Image (spheres, rainbow, N blue to C red):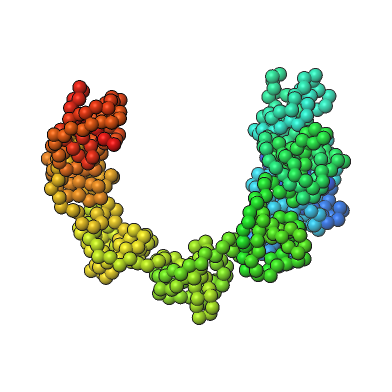
Amino acid sequence: MRNIAVIIVLLVSFLIGMPHEAEASNQGQLIIINKSNNQLAFYDNGKLVRTFSVGTGRDNAFTPEGTFKIVNKIKNRPYYSGNIPGGDPRNPLGDRWLGLDARGTYGTTYAIHGNNNPASIGNYVSAGCVRMHNHEVRWLFDQVKLNTTVIITNTNNTFEQIARSRGYQITQGQAINKTITVLERTHLYNQPNTSSRTSAVLNPQSVRATEKLSNWYKINTWMGPRWIPSNNTIDGTIKNISQKLTLTENARLHNQPIANTRRSEVLRPQMVQATGEWNGWYRVNTWLGSKWIKPSNVIVGEIKSISQKITLTQNTYLHNQPFTNTRRSELLRPQTVQATGEWNGWYRINTWVGPKWIKPSNAIVGEIKQISQIITLTQNTYLHNQPFDNTRRSDLLRPQTVQATGEWNGWYRINTWVGPKWIKPANAIVGEIKQISQSITLTQNTHLHNQPFANTRRSEVLGPQTVQATGEWNGWYRINTWVGSKWIQPTNAIVGEIKSISQSITLTQNTHLHNQPFANTRRSEVLGPQTVQATGEWNGWYRVNTWLGSKWIQPTNAIVGEIKSISQSITLTQNTYLHNHPFANTRRSEVLQPQTVHAIGEWNGWYQINTWIGPKWIKVN
């Protein structure tokens, strides 16, 4: 019995001396919550990984201060007092719970958790817990280990200072890779502390930061990696601009684009020229030199001078400036007004209280074009009170032909049984369908359509053939088919008859063969200069018989028809250029002085003569 007791004592001593597995697994993690600014920092292995905004107690005493441990991790914890199940969007605990052993509790009373009110984050709102955004606490929940130390404090110290004061070893800052702009001459430091300042100075410029530790940046310099304080730096670069700004209210000058560099001097409402921009701040030249402003209600760029009619279709408030927060109590009833200026969707008009601004909804900008136009509706079309989608009525028109009396921006005004209304029809045939009786030769497969619109295509296809069109609209042709009257929009179609001819054509340069009388059917084979016999003509193209069968050509500088043989004296009364062929673009540099020449051929007002460089052509004025 005595031996058993000894064994038990040794076993207990051994177990007590063993480190907790949870404690061993969380070495290097630390959470700091600073109630002074409602920020949470998560450290891992001496490195600041992320910071978050949080909500804490609505009374300073509600959220306990001290050093605690995370003792449990719960997903979808129910809200017992409200009888709300875990995972419910109404649950004020969100769906993640990191329980703290605060004030003698064991993770059941105080915790870091989610919320059901995102607007509360960053504020003093809770009964004692620390609230986070749901997506952020989920991330933290997956990273943090049980038994992680949590420090809750209320101090002006930085996270790094808090961590070091509790014995936590900061091994490095947060690794970053971003451009920062140094705004003033700044000393370089060997370490991120003021006691390590060097004599080297960095002039204002943009640099690449590789690490951030508290209020310090590490950058690469000509001396190697060095540190600079983050005050008087901004993220990114300053954009150089040349931009007019109209200040509509007083704007404070600042030495830098940082709020705490504000000066006492003020710019009154006026127009200034900005030379730089960063994050809503503008650099301007002043009597004090280059300064910065972050103006409210500033008009960036020019106000466009216009003379434009605007029809207001609903009540519209006047504004002192083109910004919603300058709204006046006066309003305009539906009417037509004359705008004298435009900026960013706002319009300046003259009123009984002087020039004011409006940003009208459902306003008709410009004239309504008065028309008398037939429109064929091919599908159901809703009526609208005004030419805007959000004014749709329940009444609709079935497919029919209507008469439009006005047009604006793709909308049509028509008279209806409920008075003048507006329509914006889809697949509407605007204007008359031209009645024709026209042969069309299809040279490739062509889909049928129910209406003259691409989105009404049917599955049926016409092979190459000649069809008879009964109507034409906007490049579409109506034909009668075995499925009734349908529409086609053929590619490479020969509209009309091919004129049968028997015509000599003299080619004066290389000419490609084509399968059809269209440029996109060109073949690789070429006819050299020669005389060919054309059997057909259509739209400037000629059909000829070749070793490949019947093909088409569209020759350049071709002599169509016979050259008339003549024997004619022609007296030149002025200098006359020689040409290789009877076309202006074949002119040569040689010139005939005034003289009498003998013409041996004539074509289309040109004369062929023999010269010292062979037969050439002239065009006599």
Q: Position of residue 373 (x, y in %)?
A: 44, 68
* Quadrant position of residue 349: bottom right
The residue at the far bottom in this view is: 417
* Of residues 608 and 314, the one drawn nearer to the viewer in this rendering: 608
Q: Position of residue 541 (x, y in %)?
A: 23, 46
* Position of residue 367 in the picture relative to residue 293 (left or right): left
Q: Position of residue 405 (x, y in %)?
A: 49, 70
Task: State the quadrant of the C terminus.
Answer: top left
Residue at position x 46%, y 75% in the image: 397
* Position of residue 407 in the picture relative to residue 192 (left or right): left
* Of residues 107 and 421, the one drawn nearer to the viewer in this rendering: 421
Residue at position x 25%, y 47% in the image: 540
Q: Position of residue 90 (x, y in %)?
A: 68, 64
Task: State the quadrant of the N terminus.
Answer: top right
Residue at position x 79%, y 47% in the image: 269
* Of residues 558 and 548, the one drawn nearer to the viewer in this rendering: 558
Is residue 604 among what the camera can see?
yes
Is residue 230 among what the camera can see?
no
Q: How many labels were placed on the picture?
A: 0
* Position of residue 489 in the picture relative to residue 245 (left or right): left
* Of residues 253 and 347, the one drawn nearer to the viewer in this rendering: 347
* Position of residue 532 in the picture relative to residue 424 (left or right): left
Determine whether 548 is above or below 376 in the image.
Answer: above
Residue at position x 67%, y 33% in the image: 179
Determine whether 377 is above or below 454 in the image.
Answer: below
Determine whether 621 is above or below 386 in the image.
Answer: above
